[in-house]
Amino acid sequence: MPDIASLLAPNPFSNDDGSVPPELAKAFTLSVADGRAEAVVASLTRVLLPVVPHEHPGLDESGRVKEHQSYSAQPLAGDGSLVTAELAGQRPAVVVFSGIDALRQWHKGARPVPATVESVAIASLKQQTGLMVLDPGSTTETWLGRTAVIALASGGRWLAPWNDERINDCVATVAREVASGIVHMSIEPGPAGFCIVDIGFPADSQMSDVMRVATYVSEALESDPYVRARLDVVEIRPRIC
């Protein structure tokens, strides 16, 4: 039986034309160094969920539709209808869009379903890995790790990993452990909202040494429970200075 109360409730998106909300559009214009990722997370309110059409399963010998998996037209119904994309490490992230143009660029046949970012974040944490990706495949693509998604679900303030003193202290500790083989090491925001652990090596470094240090850094950061819980979307980036 349908939820009568929800059917009679006013639609908060009745006047939504699918354009990018002004505050979010402003956040997209910022550079990475000027806090683009933080501004994007802070300005997210409404997002568009894609409903992707599925191919007709065909008919059986008696002319009836073949048995097939049914999909809800409501992505937040809790039946696994949330569309996901694969992020680094082959982990699924719930796909959301800032506006209709980015959605159409991603899939011309997808139908947009507006939803509050809070409801999508909660569903992502309950039904999926707690990761989200905004506008995949576009110039405004932004990865949202679990700390960002938790902040969106709770209405709290997001502390970006690269601004977290405890994470920076851990990175500094690991850097001291490998100081003899590197020029510098730091944690920085990436262009799509993910974290970069930037490791600079001397010009005369051997590739075997570079790989050994990069592996050590990755394992050292992974071994710290606090860091591991907050660096779920991260790239270790070794480079020769």
Image: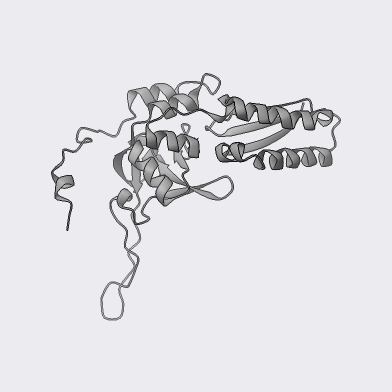
Total marks drawn? 0
235 or 140: nearer the viewer: 235
In this view, 53 is above or below 120: below
109 or 164: nearer the viewer: 164
In the image, taking residue 223 as reference, residue 205 lies left or right, namely: right
Q: Is residue 135 visible?
A: no
Q: Where in the figure is residue 141, as x and y percent of width and height?
A: 47, 35
In this view, 162 is above or below 101: above
In the image, taking residue 191 as reference, residue 100 lies left or right, namely: left
In the image, taking residue 187 as reference, residue 72 lies left or right, namely: left
Q: Quadrant of the N terminus?
A: bottom left
Q: Quadrant of the C terminus?
A: top right
Q: Residue placed at 43% from the left, 33% from the top?
A: 151
Q: Residue placed at 24% from the left, 33% from the top?
A: 16
The answer to which image quadrant residue 23 occupies is: top left
Q: Is residue 138 visible?
A: yes
Q: Residue placed at 29% from the left, 34% from the top?
A: 18
Q: Where in the figure is residue 162, as x and y percent of width and height?
A: 58, 27
In the image, taking residue 12 as reference, residue 222 lies left or right, namely: right
Q: Where in the figure is residue 117, as x and y percent of width and height?
A: 35, 36
